[in-house]
Image (cartoon, rainbow, N blue to C red):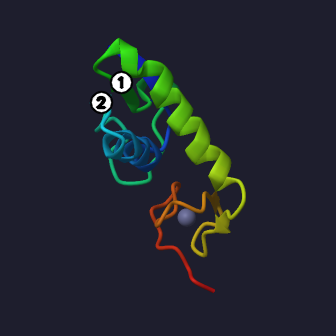
Amino acid sequence: MKLVFTHPGHIVVAQARTCLELAGIKCVMRNEYAAGAMGELAPIDVWPELWVLRDRDYERATLLLAQSRADIQEEEWHCRRCGTLSPATFEVCWHCAGERSLA
Ligand SMILES: [Zn+2]
């Protein structure tokens, strides 16, 4: 097992997991419930973590996540509720889980 990704926003880690699962990479989340309510930020020592089960998937996983983040930078959107900038691929605000506005 290798740690590929960690972030204080539970939703961000969950979406990274979905990204890897779609690519056929087996992975698990740790500290999944540390953040409590959706969108709530966890203290740094209990950030949700994403681990790949097979070490050989590690490089591909980091590459996929880097790519998805590169795409993201083109069309970020601002949350109407909290004003946080979220990546284009996210359907809800990573910070407060507010719905994406289509304005
Ligand atoms: Zn928000």
Q: Residue at x 45, y 62 (%)?
A: 97
| Amino acid at the residue labelled 2 | Cys
Q: Position of residue 29 (x, y in %)?
A: 31, 32
Q: Residue at x 47, y 73 (%)?
A: 99
Q: Which residue is mark 2?
A: 27
In the picture provided, is 3 more to the left or to the right than 76? left
Q: Report the amino acid beneath label 1.
A: Trp
Graded by Cα atoms within 10 Å as few (under 14), some (14 to 19) or many (20 or more), the crowding at tag 1 reads many
| Side of 83 relative to 32 (left or right) | right
Q: Is mark 2 within 8 Å of ligand 1?
A: no
Question: Marks 1 and 2: CB-CB under 8 Å?
Answer: yes
Q: Judging from the image, what secondary structure is the residue with disc 2 in?
A: strand
Residue 84 vs residue 50, the one in the foreground: 50
Q: Which mark is residue 51?
A: 1
Q: Residue at x 53, y 55 (%)?
A: 95
Question: The N terminus is located in which quarter?
Answer: top left
| Vertical relation: 59 (above or below) 48 | above
Q: Report ligand 1 position as a quadrant.
A: bottom right
Q: Position of residue 69 (x, y in %)?
A: 61, 45
Q: Quadrant of residue 78 in the image? A: bottom right
